[in-house]
């Protein structure tokens, strides 16, 4: 069961590794990113950040989609993490079980505007958000599971 699809440019770190996995009772974290799937050093450091009792898989986005469509994946309680909205869009549009998106952290970048304490969006990001929303999915901004959800649809009007 997919518990959460999260966009966080830091990928796996303390908030995600401990607060979210505990709150959602996750036993599998999937980091989906084409570049990091081939970066052994980054994969090793992400492995150090995961809780001891949680499995971690780091794969390309296309491979994550394939994995998430299997019966075996449905036996896990999964948290999927990507570091950009383009990858999130690919997952949400192609994996039927995903019905919402959490924006947890997108730091300031050239051309971005701040929408919450932890989320800045570029015009391209906003276009992607609108596509996802128009396709019928919810997008919420929330760093921690105890924070109030902020509806991105309302923030990007």
Image (spheres, rainbow, N blue to C red):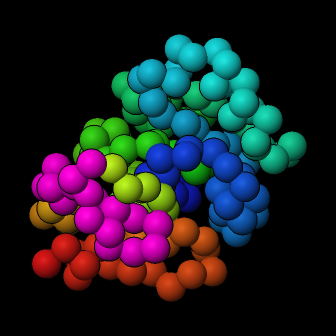
Residue toward you, 1 or 42: 42
Q: Is residue 114 visible?
A: yes
Is residue 55 positioned above or below 35 on the image?
below
From this viewpoint, which residue is outermost toward the right? 52
x%, y% of residue 37?
53, 21
Tell me if 3 is positioned left or right of 129 in this view.
right
Is residue 100 visible in the rendered image? The answer is: no
Q: Which residues are magenta?
A: 110-127
**Residue 134 in the figure: left or right of residue 76:** left
Residue 114 percent location from the top left of the image: 32, 69
- Compared with residue 102, is residue 45 higher up or lower down, i.e. above or below? above
Quarter of the rendering containing residue 66: top left
Q: Is residue 46 above or below residue 59?
A: below
Reply above or below: 119 against 58.
Answer: below
User: What residue lies at 45% left-to-right and 80% top-to-bottom?
Assistant: 149
Residue ID at (48%, 59%): 105
| Residue 63 in picture, x, y percent from top left | 44, 23
Front residue of this view, candidates 59 and 46: 46
- Determine the residue positioned at 72% across, 30% down: 45
Outermost residue, front side = 110
In the rendered image, the quadrant that contains the C terminus is bottom left
């Amino acid at each position: 069961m997919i518990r959460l699809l999260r966009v966080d440019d830091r990928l796996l770190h303390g908030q995600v590794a401990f607060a979210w996995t505990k709150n959602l009772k996750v036993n599998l974290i999937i980091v989906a990113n084409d570049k990091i799937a081939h970066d052994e050093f980054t994969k090793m450091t992400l492995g150090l950040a995961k809780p001891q009792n949680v499995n971690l898989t780091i794969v390309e986005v296309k491979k994550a989609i394939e994995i998430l469509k299997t019966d075996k994946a449905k036996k896990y309680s999964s948290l999927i993490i990507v570091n950009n909205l383009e990858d999130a869009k690919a997952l949400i549009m192609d994996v039927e079980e995903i019905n919402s998106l959490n924006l947890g952290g997108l730091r300031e970048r050239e051309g971005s505007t701040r929408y919450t304490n932890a989320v800045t969006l570029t015009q391209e990001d906003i276009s992607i958000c609108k596509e996802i929303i128009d396709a019928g999915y919810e997008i919420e901004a929330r760093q921690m599971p105890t924070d109030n959800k902020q509806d991105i649809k309302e923030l990007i009007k």
